[in-house]
Image (cartoon, rainbow, N blue to C red):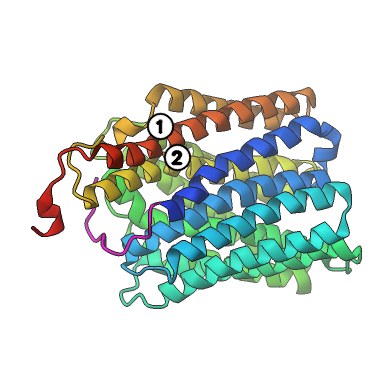
Amino acid sequence: MNFTGLSLDQAPPISAPVRFFLTAPLFAMLGAVFIFMFEPVALMSRFSLETITVTHMFTIGFIAMVMLGALQQMLPVLAGVSLPKASLVATSSHLLISLGLVLMSIGLLQSMKVVIFIATLSLGIGFLILLIAILIAISKVEFLTATIKGMRVAIGFAFVTVILGMYLLSSYGTGVMGESHLSFANIHAVLAIFGFAGVLIIGVSFQVIPMFYVTPAFHEGYQKYLVLLVATALLLWAVLSFVAVDFAWMAKAVLVVLFALFGYLIIQKMSQRKRPIADITVYYWRLSGVMAILGTLLWLGSAWIEDEVITTVGVIIGGGFLMAVMSGMLYKIIPFLVWFHLNGMGYMSIPSMGEMVHKKMALVQFVLFVLTLALFALAFWLPLLMKVGALTLFVSMVLLEINLVTAYRNYGETCKRKPDFDMSMMGG
């Protein structure tokens, strides 16, 4: 790996980001349970309460959890700035988001208005606490790399996404939905997927892929303009969705081209690795690149295809693109954090990052994840496959959780053993 340009002296306690990482597969398991429990026909509608509940188990419970955990670690490591009150912010934000997501599912599925309002406040405050802390930290960065610029744009979209989400969720509590409810729901979903998650992945990949996989750097033009073009296309699409719906597809097409291009760049970078041996994370990155291309193209064509295909798009983009990136990076980030913190404490005889992950279990988990995507996509023609996919997804997430916990246990066990402590690391 290439750690050039990293700042290693302002990292938060390892527990701050790891609590988010280890929670993510648990919510994905809960999402799989819901999919198994619900009738497939209920999940065919984008706006059914069942679909909304399941969707947020993965978007907030898995994808956002991983991104928020990663941001806490990446800002100190990649940007050299630390979050204010890092432990307190992480603990309170994690608790509020987790509680809010559970209450949201109960409130929506049981039509409990008070619970929905509490969930709205819990989720909103939980997200805003951490986003504001990240914004404060990122405002202190003096040297703006392409990754830092991408983070800033992603955080901006995150704020809009959260505010829209609070408005939409609270409307289920009041029972009053304005004429623009569905339009706001569409904008909320697109900004969450492409604005917050998509832009953050693009920005972070500019530094993380060359660092972890020892690839050539992304072309300067991509680093300089890709995030800017995506942000412009997103804002234009959002505006046109209200004032000139017939022309919104133009901005949508630009967005599709940009993310399809990024998908191609991911695949290209994975083939340019200087160390050709592939691990499970390489498979995940390649899968995400393919799914970014297929998913966005299908999304563009959804205007001319039956509405049910939109849900298939959600499976391909949300599952294939976003969840693949998050799953793959979890296999990198947690072993890196364990190695990073133990090495910084002066311990020398510690497992390498590759040794912390059970490779065969990770491969089985990846295969089950890919099988799940295929089963969910085919379920729109054979609904029974939805429940089979729920089972494969559940097992896949159980294996992911076991692998992550196993990797993290190296930290506690090494601290207890204190092997080969090097006093020179303490300045002695």
Q: Is residue 276 above or below residue 132?
A: above
- The local crowd at label 1, few if under 14, some if 14 to 19, many if 20 or more residues have their Cα within 10 Å, is many
Asked if labels 2 and 1 touch by Cβ distance under 8 angstroms, the answer is yes
- Labels 1 and 2: the sequence-earlier one: 1
Q: Is residue 105 above or below residue 374?
A: below
State the residue at coordinates (89%, 52%).
111
Residue 210 part of the magenta-drawn span = no
Task: Provide residue 405's location: percent of width, then percent of height.
Answer: 45, 36
Q: Which residues are magenta?
A: 1-14
Q: Secondary structure at mark 1?
A: helix
- The local crowd at label 2, few if under 14, some if 14 to 19, many if 20 or more residues have their Cα within 10 Å, is many
Please state if 299 lies on the left or on the right of 349 as rendered.
Answer: right
Please state if 47 lies on the left or on the right of 11 as rendered.
Answer: right
State the residue at coordinates (24%, 53%).
3
Task: Provide residue 399's location: percent of width, then percent of height.
Answer: 52, 28
* Residue that badge 2 annotates: 328
User: Which mark, residue 280?
Assistant: 1
Residue 6 part of the magenta-drawn span = yes
Q: For residue 415, which quarter of the picture? A: top left
> Which amino acid type is shown beneath numbered disc 1?
Ile
**Total numbered labels:** 2
Q: For residue 359, which quarter of the picture? A: top left
